[in-house]
Image: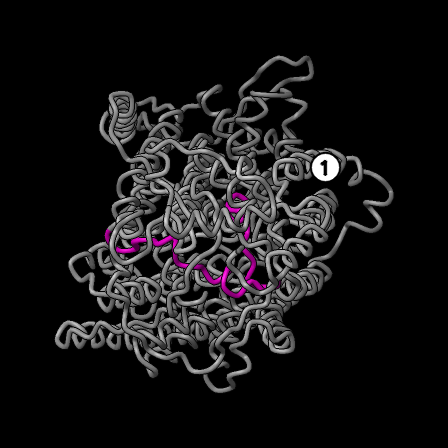
Amino acid sequence: MPGPRRRRPHRCGPRRRIRPRSDRGRDPGRRLRPGRPGRPSLQASGQIQVISFMAEQTSASALPTYTPEEERRVIRNSKGVPVGIRPDSRWTPRRIVLWVAITALGVLGWTMLAAVRGERVDTIWFVITAVCTYVIAYRFYALYVQRTIMRPDDTNATPSERINNGKDFDPTNRIVLYGHHFAAIAGAGPLVGPVLAAQMGYLPGTLWIIVGVCLAGAIQDMLVLFFSMRRGGRSLGQMATDEIGKVGGIVATVIVFVMLMIVLAVLAMICVNALAASPWGVFSVGCTIPIAIAMGLWLRFVQPGRITQVSIVGFVILIGVIVAGRWVADSAFGRAHLHLSPTALVWAMIVYGFFAAVLPVWMLLTPRDYLSTFMKVGTIVVLALGILIVRPIVEMPAVTEFATNTAGPVFAGSIFPFLFITIACGALSGMHAMVSSGTSPKMIQKESQTRMIGYGGMLMESFVAVMAMAAAVSLNQGIYFGMNTSTATVDKLAGSAVVQSAGNREDITAEAVQNLGVTDVHGDRIRATWETWDENGNTITVHDGDAYRAVAEDVGETSIVSRTGGAPTLAVGMAHILHQVGGGRTMMGFWYHFAIMFEALFILSAVDAVTRVARFQLSDALGNAIPRFADPSWRVGAWITTAIVVAAWGSLLLMGVTDPRGGIQTLYPLFGIANQLIAAVALLVVTVMVVRKGYARYVWIPIIPLVFDTVVTFVASWQKIFSHDSALGYWQQWRDARAKLASLTDADQIAVQRAIERNTFIQGTLSIVFLVTVAFVMACGIVRVVRTLRTGDPSTSEDPRQESNFFAPCTFVPSALDRKCAAEYEVVGDPALIPGLKQAERAARLQTAGTGTGDGT
């Protein structure tokens, strides 16, 4: 991580409109070549200043030497300091062959998944198809968007370089920031959404996850990140106010904040459910906090910039903690002190969320997210390798009977629009736009890193969703539906006679699954089937109730039927694959509980980061009335806004664990729609900014996902409000509950129906409010676009340009030229920004170079 904070003046008053610079849209590589008009020659100015500085600091031989081709690619500021590198986009025979091979493999993968299919579809094609599509989209489509709309300029200083207050604005190593960004956006959605959507078959969800991320989700994340970075790291709500207008912006800010509180509370609730009564999970997740703090302090003060060494040590300690967690959980200490109740976990999460949001990002939030990414990405890579090695067969048909009706036992709703709502992340997520306009734009080092962080981070999350889908559909259909069908639905499907005569839930569930009317890939009616081992270690196949009991015994649970929510199903699917790679039968329980803990860690990283993001959103909103709140360095304002945010989602979460029939359970059905409505607002703001920047010819890039997401969310909201289907419509459920109350006499049944009446009333009311307010914001955005096109007004809310004096690579793996420029920058760069300098050395160089000059000369 970079050195100590460097105070820079920050404008916290009203934001003034500025016209874009005449050269803002040009390629910085062409504009800044040595010898071109408009700037002094590199040899005439930059090298003279550099050498004069070097005469006092070191010999000229310490500077690296460049070939003419390398020098042509180096981007320097007006003082000759390297600030970036032009990409080498030449096509060579080797590159052509490589991309032709990747394309051919990707086409083969899609053919096997979508066209050929047949009775045996190998899950290996999920991995191949996804990876090939991702790399093609990243190399070509994302680069096209970067060149046409974003046009990054590495000679322009980012907010982290300009402000660099060592708290929220901190130039962060691109790999660490990638880890933070990925950990922050990767919440519950990519894990449980695909598992739930698998009831419609493997093909619809897989298509949406892979195609949707390339054309919608990753585009949203990348563009929001870039535009927020150009505006000093402003929040989505503040950008809506600046670009759409005051009225529409205020409405967008308020409604997005409310929906974000619902999203946060639901994410936290899933995490609480995963960690409750799990000493192993509590110990392992809790240990990531002191490990992260130690990493942050070490990188800040002991070995600045030594990312590799600290990463290796942190990863080794993390693995040790995970392995030791199983022993700690079985110890007397674990049973006595780490067996926490849901209420205790809620308060622990509230306290943690507050401190993670107010402490400097380099101390806790960023290193913990970076550390979490090791486990997240590592686990998903191990799962992908397990799929490649084991090659499990897809048990779920490409499309099931539930894709075209509302009778699905997992969730109600047909493929359109509810598939795109259920998979709330992995393809497109509004919460990502909050992170992309929250923490990440305040820490990114160079503008050219936006594609790697924004687009690349979202592709990684999409791959998580694909692996979750592959793990779920590789399970036997009977096991899948038995785990994801609620107890009430199971009893209804089995019939009262079976419920009364059966001696256990497993046999009742087996009868209910057979009564679903679902067929397998052979056209036969499904039944629960599981391969296990007898007492002699021989492989046997069991069916129906025995299959459910065998699964529970193999993973170390008392029962696995009606374990709804998706997370337990994913854990069984992962354990089913990974135990065949390492450990055998004896490791089945380990992999299952490891997956449960993995899911909790996955989600918690999103909760802490989005809490900080919500704080930024609230601070920006209050800053319009009280300018002091707009100052990110004002600690009192940060504490106040953070306290409000954690109180909001914490109260909803606390109600959820203390009142099972209310609180968060009431708001959970709104999670998917609220999340995608935030995405619609984010894409609208991006569309307005693209038009106002003068790039109307490329506005189709954000408009395509905007129109699709708007139609999906509005149709889903309409059906939830006005549908007369009791499985779907909130108000129909409200009417049914009121009708039943008149004929009930049992106190427990009356309480249940009153809870349904209250919950559906809240759900229906909020659905109407969300739909109306987002429609109003859409109308305001359309008016702004039409007005801009008519008047040709080129005004923008971007911050004034300030020349950069900082160098950092823009690719994940630095090239040889990157390393040369980094070595030169360590000699000629700004001492306050050079990575890897210790405190004493930095202070000495600042004093020698002239404190506050900021140019290294």
**Which residue is the extreme one toward the right?**
332
Above or below: residue 757 compared with residue 312: below
In the rendered image, residue 14 lying in the magenta stretch gets the answer no
Q: Secondary structure at mark 1?
A: helix
At 47% across and 73% down in the image, what residue appears?
Answer: 258
The colour scheme is one colour
Q: Is residue 503 visible?
A: no
Type of amino acid at the residue the image marks with label 1: Ile
Q: What main secondary structure does the magenta stretch of the protein show? A: loop
At 31% across and 47% down in the image, what residue appears?
Answer: 34
Q: Nearer the viewer, residue 749 or 479?
A: 479
Tell me where the magenta segment starts and ends, as one range: 148-177
Above or below: residue 829 compared with residue 101: below
Residue at image mark 1: 317
Give the side of residue 345 with respect to residue 186, left or right: right
At 81% across and 45% down in the image, what residue appears?
Answer: 334
Quarter assignment of residue 634 = bottom right
Residue 574 x/y as whole percent:
54, 32
Q: Is residue 41 visible?
A: yes
**Which residue is the extreme one toward the bottom?**
625
Give the side of residue 555 with respect to residue 698, left or right: right
Residue 712 x/y as whole percent:
28, 59
**Which residue is the extreme one toward the left?**
790
Q: Nearer the viewer, residue 485 or 38?
A: 38
Q: Residues within 10 Å of mark 1 (few under 14, many from 20)?
A: some
Q: Nearer the viewer, residue 368 or 269?
A: 368
Quarter assignment of residue 270 = bottom right
Residue 61 x/y as whole percent:
54, 35
In the rendered image, residue 164 lying in the magenta stretch gets the answer yes
Give the side of residue 844 with respect to residue 384, left or right: right
Q: Nearer the viewer, residue 748 or 812?
A: 812
Above or below: residue 531 compared with residue 195: above
